[in-house]
Amino acid sequence: MSVDRSVPFNRETLESVLKRRFFFAPSFDIYGGVSGLYDYGPPGCALQSNIIDAWRKHFILEEDILEVDCSMLTPYEVFKTSGHVDKFADWMCRDPATGEIFRADHLVEEVLEARLKGDKLARGQDHAEKDTSEEKKRKKKVKEIVAVKLDDSVAAEYEFVLAQIDGYSGPELGDLMKKFDIRNPATGGELTPPMEFNLMFETAIGPSGQLKGYLRPETAQGQFLNFSKLLESNNLRMPFASAAIGKSFRNEISPRSGLLRTREFCMAEIEHFIDPENKSHPRFSEVKDTVLRLLPKSTQQEGLNDLLEITIGEAVEKGIVDNETLGYFLVRIYTFLLSIGADPARIRFRQHLQNEMAHYAADCWDGEMNTSYGWIECIGCADRSAYDLSVHSARTNEKLVVRETLEAPKEIEDYEVTIDKKKFGPLFRKDAGKVENYLTSRTQCELEDLAKELSEKKSISFVVDGVQDNKTLSLDDSLIKIEKTKKLQHIREYIPNVIEPSFGISRILYCLIEQNFWVRPDDLSRSVLSFTPAIAPTKVLLVPLSNNEVFTPIVADITKRLRKSFISSKIDDSSASIGRRYARNDELGTPFGVTVDFQSVKDHTVTLRHRDTTMQVRGSQEDIIAAISAMVFDGLSWDDATAKLDAFEGQQE
Amino acid sequence: MSVDRSVPFNRETLESVLKRRFFFAPSFDIYGGVSGLYDYGPPGCALQSNIIDAWRKHFILEEDILEVDCSMLTPYEVFKTSGHVDKFADWMCRDPATGEIFRADHLVEEVLEARLKGDKLARGQDHAEKDTSEEKKRKKKVKEIVAVKLDDSVAAEYEFVLAQIDGYSGPELGDLMKKFDIRNPATGGELTPPMEFNLMFETAIGPSGQLKGYLRPETAQGQFLNFSKLLESNNLRMPFASAAIGKSFRNEISPRSGLLRTREFCMAEIEHFIDPENKSHPRFSEVKDTVLRLLPKSTQQEGLNDLLEITIGEAVEKGIVDNETLGYFLVRIYTFLLSIGADPARIRFRQHLQNEMAHYAADCWDGEMNTSYGWIECIGCADRSAYDLSVHSARTNEKLVVRETLEAPKEIEDYEVTIDKKKFGPLFRKDAGKVENYLTSRTQCELEDLAKELSEKKSISFVVDGVQDNKTLSLDDSLIKIEKTKKLQHIREYIPNVIEPSFGISRILYCLIEQNFWVRPDDLSRSVLSFTPAIAPTKVLLVPLSNNEVFTPIVADITKRLRKSFISSKIDDSSASIGRRYARNDELGTPFGVTVDFQSVKDHTVTLRHRDTTMQVRGSQEDIIAAISAMVFDGLSWDDATAKLDAFEGQQE
């Protein structure tokens, strides 16, 4: 059974369906809307919760993950420690004349893309790429493409910059703007150099207004802070993973592209805690032969974007993907996307460039889905190393570690701090404990530096938060010794590393909609959303042949049976033709239609229609509901589920 | 099959289980926590999502409700219009000497309760009501109970005030504080009179910092703003309901009682839109004989709290509950609570006092659950009348109405505005449209007033937002006429009323935990959480008899089969005794235990244990899994599901 999906995709047609059927719409629409905020209507909301449900089954249940639900409101201290207060920012430029604000990387990208299009136009290579309305809105900074031919070398340089646009720092973007003379596209006015703009929403917690807080920009920190409780919940066994599903918030400078860059969005994040000395995965052998399409950073650095098709086993072996656990999750992400109906030919994994990675990441791959907006980052799969647990631990003095009894004790050589407590106490008085605590809780790496300082200068200087107004303290070598000592270790203590697959549910939702949208070639007004039965917002459309009263009790009875089986259904008993009623639900993605006709009144049989092929079969109510249930819950194909039912040619659409 | 639940409830025991097993814990615990913010650990999170899942099936699926998911971030204008900016506040008092802040109604309540306890103590009526640790924390304002005898009339007055404590306004609370000399309990210092404190968290949206916004304190507004799109989604048919599930935020002055009053919480809200002239419900006859326990406002106003047991049919007939739709939802709320395992004897519905109702409500009943903290409001069921749709419509000039074609045209008499456009245009120039729009969009009620003003003063004066700097405008009767005119109405246009059942999921979750907690009389260290199978965080505990390797493949096989059936399971292959392992999972609420023993190796049979009774049966893996599935998904009882399996007495706990 195949369907003809040859009609070229047109985003305007899709957008009109999404708007008309209220998949989603700008929030506060009647107040004029607020950019970057969207509401999901009934089909969008059901689609979202079905995707989340599938995600829970694919990951939480299958991988035995510990799901948590943590607060979105977060006090300042937590994000100060995690680095978000200082570094979770985008670069923006302001036009001092007009007050307009631009996101620097987007501006450079749009201006260079526009110039390259203008170049093609001038060279007569324009393939009439028509910008759709939404695309125009997105690219509103550059109003029109002007046909200006570029030198070959300049065009090549633009292409090179665009291939790694995500990798530039703010000052580098500033240099590019100077070099390529990038200005306010509307007025030609000069812009300020890129400045950092923090993307977190700020608020105050409590009636005093004194406790500064933020809305979380990711769900991860809540999981890290609960690490010890989670390890305990897992009976102290490693490795293990936690996960959280929920809303996060980023105060985007210029939200764009509908659901693809919003200020409030649904995420699902897994934090997989592993031994830094052993990043293998027990189930890697199950996935190692899966072929993925990769775009490694080396390719991007050459200004190219050719994909590498390779088994994950080989990719890990060759060091393209850093370790088994990262590789295992790339495959699990891939199979998740396939299970919810993504197009395998439009999925790729792109490695982050060095500059592009979040401040905490050691390696990162994006799961990207291809749409009319280009390749969209939908999932990040990062190795966050021990960064988060280390910084929170250092800040709070709570150990966030794993203790592992060694089978054989091991001789180790560690730096150790010895303090002359007799002199130390009188010197620091009430702060003596704090200072001692500070010194004894340094990492081995920090102690190595301090030992060096002590041997060279015969004293060390340092600052302890909250002691003597944060003035620099000094200790000479009569008060402190920092020396390497050998000892037998019976318990190994380590801070786990974290592999983090992080899913942007709203983005996946949009990309899935685009990849599943098509138009029937025999009637261009009839569009279809080919969602899988498990993901489809509504599973069954119930259609009585006419509004004759004899059908009412049968329809009511089927509705009741479907509800009992937790299968969502809608009745369309309007006076429109059967074909028209089916068409209205094809564009909602309803996979099955059940028609009740005069034959049903006689023998309680009904017909079952397949959305994509419009094929129909006929059977008893029980058999039809069993077939639907098998397709919705057990993932059976139409052919398998309806094999024993009779083909039906009665009503024509 | 019954269980012995005779051991008295002890909150400290429960709290120790909840903490130890990480049902929930203060957020940012290692940073010292932030009051009113909690994280759910794995069992709490699973419990929450199972309750939400049950809610979706009970309401969304069964009542054919349109679920939406709207933004939490909301611009100022929306909450200004809805009245939240001006009225969504609690009353707080400050101690100018210490800077402490008190929530006025809580302070009055706690002080009077403490004095009544002191009175009982002085009268020798103290029944050794020991405050648990959490209770002490909650009642931290009043440090200790002092035995002071009160006059009988004073004690009676305190009781009277406490019975309607939720009904006092801020100034009334101030009067009570003066009358009863209520001061800072710790210092005896005098407090400021109660001042309003707005409970919404404020933030700024966008890079300019100019657009003020709030975190929503309820999900309702998003649903109201989308009314027209939702009506369209419902094929313009009335009545219908929308619903939203998600987090809301309230900046509580003094969060207390664990999950019962938090600053971030999960809600599920239904907005049922009905014809104000017809509040009947088509399915009311299905529920009319259900008996509910009601506490009407008349009883509370007499200072009493006796419950009225009455069928909902009679309650509506007698006008105790205002209308069928409100009554229908009270029953549906009740059956929902029963379906997730609440104790019917500990559910009541309390009517709001006039002062207590939200500013928009016309009538309101709270679904309350009884716990060791007393009766807890878990669900509000309010008639919000046409308030919200009216104010948003007036503010935005978007009609939020239903248009109904009348079967027979109807003669109506309405006020109508006629404007002399020739004079009007030059007078207001560019603002003429705005002024005209303002005048023609007045309600009939407002027009009646304006007509009166015009006939009395020969002119009207009014303010139009944004016109002439909001100065008062004036029009005399040469420019405008407002007269009653008769016409034939073919279409009836009305603003629907809203019945709103609003569920505090976090509160329901806590109350459910308390109502399902008990301790085995034969071993007080063994506590049990008797969640229903559908709600339980984990469904099955898998226990191999020992860590003998022969059991591993069998346990793995059962795990796989359970996963395929979407039944969550955990393995406990620790070296603890079988009884110990079961006990550990009884306190997590895991309803079923499957033991794999040497017999299993021979014939693939396993035993199935029932958490509450510790009864066991034996059968093939297939039969046992089928029985579990029937109990988890189809709601079958243990007796029905295991009728065909053999009783088993082998391993003792």
Image: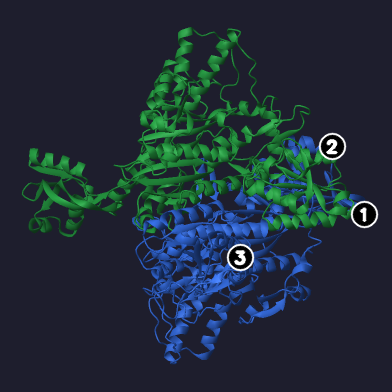
Chain colours: A blue, B green
> Please, what is the three-letter code of the amino acid marked with disc 2?
Gln
Residue at mark 2 = B652
Q: Residue at x 39, y 60 (%)?
A: A573
Q: Earlier in the sequence, mark 3 or mark 1?
A: 3
Residue at mark 3 = A379
Q: What separation in Å lies between label 2 and label 1 (alpha carbons)?
A: 43 Å
Q: Quadrant of residue B612?
A: top right
Q: Position of residue A266 (x, y in %)?
A: 54, 57
Q: Residues within 10 Å of mark 1 (few under 14, many from 20)?
A: few
Q: Residues within 10 Å of mark 3 (few under 14, many from 20)?
A: many
Of helix, strand and loop, which one carries label 2? loop
Q: Which label lies toward us, 3 or 1? A: 3
Disc 3 and disc 2 on one polypeptide chain: no
Q: Is residue A397 visible?
A: yes
Residue at mark 1 = A410
Q: Which label lies toward us, 2 or 1? A: 2
Q: Position of residue B142 (x, y in %)?
A: 57, 22
Q: What separation in Å lies between label 3 and label 1 (alpha carbons)?
A: 41 Å
- Tell me which chain the residue with mark 2 is part of: B
Q: Residue at x 11, y 55 (%)?
A: B424
- Towards the viewer: B301 or A439: B301
